[in-house]
Amino acid sequence: MLSNYAANPTQNWKNKDAAIYLVTSLASKGKTEKHGITQTNQLVNLVDFYQGHILPELSQSDGKNF
């Protein structure tokens, strides 16, 4: 999904959206109503995923992603 997004971000933005949803869903291990996610799956490195796929878009100053 992320490869398809990288090939054509404008047209394939839904692939990245779905990939983010899947990764965050698989990473959640424990949660509560009050605090949300309280434990994460150790097999999913959320920091690397965030730094590689989410932070670059949030850091862009051109405003095209908002």
Image: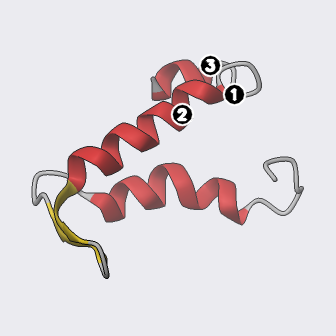
How far apart marks 2 and 1 lie (CA) works out to 8 Å
Q: Which mark is residue 9?
A: 1
In this view, the residue in front, 41 or 58, is: 41
Q: Is residue 53 left or right of residue 35?
A: right
Q: Which mark is residue 16?
A: 2
Q: Secondary structure at mark 2?
A: helix
Q: Residues within 10 Å of mark 3 (few under 14, many from 20)?
A: few
Colour mapping used in the image: secondary structure
In this view, the residue in front, 10 or 38, is: 38
> What residue type is disc 3 on?
Ala
Please tell me whether mark 1 or mark 3 is closer to you in this view. 1
In this view, the residue in front, 51 or 33, is: 33
**At 44% across and 59% down in the image, what residue appears?**
50
Q: Is residue 43 left or right of residue 27?
A: left
Identify the residue at the far front of this view.
33
How far apart marks 1 and 3 lie (CA) works out to 6 Å
- Mark closest to the chain's N terminus, 2 or 1: 1
Residue 57 image point, x, y percent: 67, 53
Residue 41 image point, x, y percent: 13, 58
Q: Residues within 10 Å of mark 2 (few under 14, many from 20)?
A: some
Q: Secondary structure at mark 1?
A: loop
Q: Which residue is mark 3?
A: 7
> What residue type is disc 2 on?
Lys
**At 46% across and 52% down in the image, what residue appears?**
52
Q: Name the quadrant containing residue 21.
A: top left
Q: Residues within 10 Å of mark 1 (few under 14, many from 20)?
A: some
Q: Which mark is residue 38?
A: none
Please tell me whether mark 2 or mark 1 is closer to you in this view. 2
